[in-house]
Image (cartoon, rainbow, N blue to C red):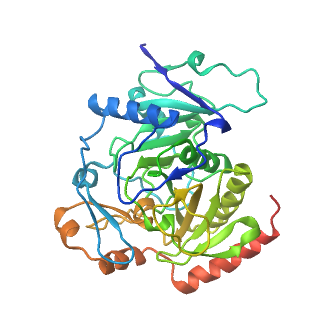
Amino acid sequence: METCLIQPFVYSDQDLVRCVVRSQGCGTLERLSKFDKSLRSSWTEKMQQGLFRYHLGDLTTRILPGSCRFVAQLNIMRGQERRKPQDILSVQQQFDSEQFNFNKIHSHEIMFQMSKQISNESNIEPQSQVKDVISENGLEGARDRVLVVINVSPLEFGHCLFIPEPTQCMPQILTASVIQTGIESVFLSADPGFRVGFNSLGAFASVNHLHLHGYYLDWELQIESAPTEPIVPQKGFHRLVDFPSGFLFYTEGERLQETATVICQLTDFLVGRNVAHNVFLTRGCPPGKRHEPALSRSGVRIIVWPRTSCFGAKEESAFNVALCELAGHLPFKNRRDFDTITENEVKSIIQNYLLSSDEFMHLQSELCKQLQSSVV
């Protein structure tokens, strides 16, 4: 059987980019990190090889008038070609090997394998010497790794999936380790437009196999600088003041493991109560009052939105409400809605999937007690 080599990507804390600068609107990136170069070049090569379901090209984009400044993009092909979501009955649903999972993808969809070099480990092979062999028809034998693969129905340039240890067959429930990988992935990019996100089951996750999304979006999002209020500041726990209400954490790269652990306590709490949720990670400003745009982005904002569950994968005609839509990035399925929709109409669609004010505040109170009593 023919085999395929997985390209390694080994990084350390020294590769994390501590500060980037956000320019107005979209613009040309002046420099690329090692991570950016690997991801962009591999993704572009695979697009040229025809491994995606459609050619992405430059997406028509407009900023909707209004205070939210929603970034609307016309992406009709994703709406048509995106994989049909699996039947989901619970946020806690177990992995099912009979359903589609990422152990069944073609090996040519893999871009590289990520692994972190810990400073006190002296026996790690140099990146150029690490090679992994997998079957051409699947991922048998792939262990203890985070695979970075293309999303064959991309929503933007560089759209990829981070899949931790795929053969362990973990369901779509966050772990502290994968949260830390997501935060570090944002820090590995020198581009303030690189975003990472997560959809839980019942929140438009289409595959029940643990994974994160990553992609580049060169347009500024309001959540990068939206004002916040402290809830449990000693745990880094804040609330977004602006629509849509969500919980926020922030880190400038210090004590990432502790930050990831606290976030995981929150998402575990939601899973335990079968509350669907979306998570979005982006470069952003420190918590507090609203910041002016075009400032440096020294840290990463991690936003968690608890929301109503969508079992049976209800579809909206304009756009589905998942991680990027809650963050203010709206991939539209059709030209009519893209051309005519207003900010108020967008907010009305999104509000249908959010908790009521009373439900949100009750959940916030419970989370306060949970995080204040926990020890990290």
Can residue 269 be seen in this snapshot? Answer: yes
Between 321 and 1, the residue placed more toward the observer is 321
Estimate the x, y position of residue 346 in percent, counting from the top left: 33, 74
Residue at 25% across, 54% down: 75
The total number of labels drawn is 0
From the viewer's side, name the closer residue of 54 and 134: 54
Would you say 165 lies left or right of 101 here?
Answer: right
Residue 44 position by quadrant: top left
In the image: residue 124, left or right of residue 217: right
Given residues 164 and 235, the one toward you in this image is 235
Residue 178's x, y, as percent?
Answer: 61, 46
Quadrant of the snapshot with the C terminus: bottom right
Seen in the picture, residue 350 relative to 52 is either above or below; the reply is below
Residue drawn at 29 percent across, 71 percent down: 64
Q: Image height check: is 195 above or below 229?
A: above
Residue pushed farthest left? 336
Q: Quadrant of residue 110?
A: top left
Can residue 281 be spotted in the picture? no
Rendered location of residue 333, percent (x, y):
25, 60
**Residue at 46% of width from left, 31% of height from top?**
38
Q: Nearer the viewer, residue 121 or 349?
A: 121
Q: In which quadrant will I find the N terminus? A: top left
**Residue positioned most to the bottom:** 358
**Residue 159 screen position, x and y as percent:** 39, 44
Asked if residue 177 is positioned above or below residue 227 in the image, the reply reads above
